Image: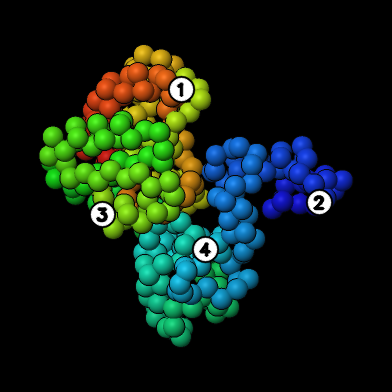
Amino acid sequence: MHLTGITVDRGELGTFGPSTQHAIEAFQERRGLLVTGVCDDATWHALVEAGYRLGDRLVYLRSPMLRGDDVQSLQLGLGALGFDAGRVDGIFGPQTERALRQFQRNQGLTTDGVCGPEVCAALTRLGGRTTSDSVAGVRERERLRATPPRLEGRRVVIGQRGGLDGLVSTIGRLLHDEGAVVAVLHHPDPSTQAREANAFDADLYIGLELLAHHECRAAFYATEGFRSIGGAQMAELLTERLPQVPGIDTSRASGLRLPILRETRMPAVVCFLGPAPVVVEQSSVVASTIVEAVRQWVTQPIEGS
């Protein structure tokens, strides 16, 4: 038996044994998810999406929106050819439909917003004529460069899913005192937080979650063909500064495809901090350190400038 190319012991068919757990861990690592060995909702949805290749089905705008590796391949192909399909997130939304219609019109195809055999053939034919950077990456970089380098007026969302109410409230208050427009989110569902952050039209999202270890891990959105420049720089600033907090020993930043990072439209990070007693005891220091990182993020030059 195979799990998207990862071998699982056939003797475990119908049972969840060590081989299946190792396969889940390998899949989670490959897909940029948290490596837990547990087939949670995010892992299950990723498994389903990994089964689609471009051309396997008709892809178009519908509700709920279609998701899958085929959509991601379409976004990559359109973006590399200069058609702005939005973030490479594998979600077929209105921006992807607009880019697809523009591509169809440009190629003399039926302009119906449906990716079928003709679109796939045209993308394959033009596949060699691509740029080194997708339109989505260029757009994010230019938006960041065009934004005034000050915290005043910036729209910032601070989110948590349990156990960190006091910390996120303190961060929100400190940012508000510096002139930022702040929303603090507490909903346990990451997709709900993403929708609320998008509706708020945020410039930056910072999510906080607890770890069992004495470390800081900051994740930003990255996938094949797209890396959030703003998210990566925010993650690096957090992992540079937070180890200065007593009790937090190590840090690292990494590109992942967690649902909250994938579904938000702005630069976003999820910062994992631990252990809980240290975070609670040092909450005022943690809060001021995060605010200082945000302050530096809004003023520093954009990567590639």
Left or right of 194: which side holds 127?
right
The disc placed on residue 200 is 3
The disc placed on residue 14 is 2
Query: What separation in Å lies between label 4 and label 3 (alpha carbons)?
Result: 23 Å
Residue type beneath disc 3: Phe
Judging depth in this view, the residue of 180 and 301 nearest the camera is 180
Q: Are marks 3 and 1 in contact (CB under 8 Å)?
A: no
**Residue 93, above or below 294:** below
Q: Which residue is the site of mark 4?
A: 67
Residue for point 44% across, 78% down: 113
Which badge, 3 or 1, is on the more N-terminal residue?
A: 3
Query: What separation in Å lies between label 4 and label 1 (alpha carbons)?
Result: 35 Å
Which badge, 1 or 2, is on the more N-terminal residue?
A: 2
Which quarter of the picture shows residue 243?
top left
Residue 143 image position (x, y, % from top left): 24, 51
Residue type beneath disc 1: Pro
The disc placed on residue 275 is 1
Which badge, 3 or 2, is on the more N-terminal residue?
A: 2
Residue type beneath disc 4: Arg
Judging depth in this view, the residue of 295 and 189 nearest the camera is 189
Q: Which quadrant is the C terminus positioned in?
A: top left
Between circles 4 and 3, the one closer to the viewer is 3
Residue 286 image position (x, y, % from top left): 31, 24
Query: What separation in Å lies between label 3 and label 2 (alpha carbons)?
Result: 45 Å
Left or right of 155: which side holds 57?
right
In this view, the residue farthest toward the right is 11
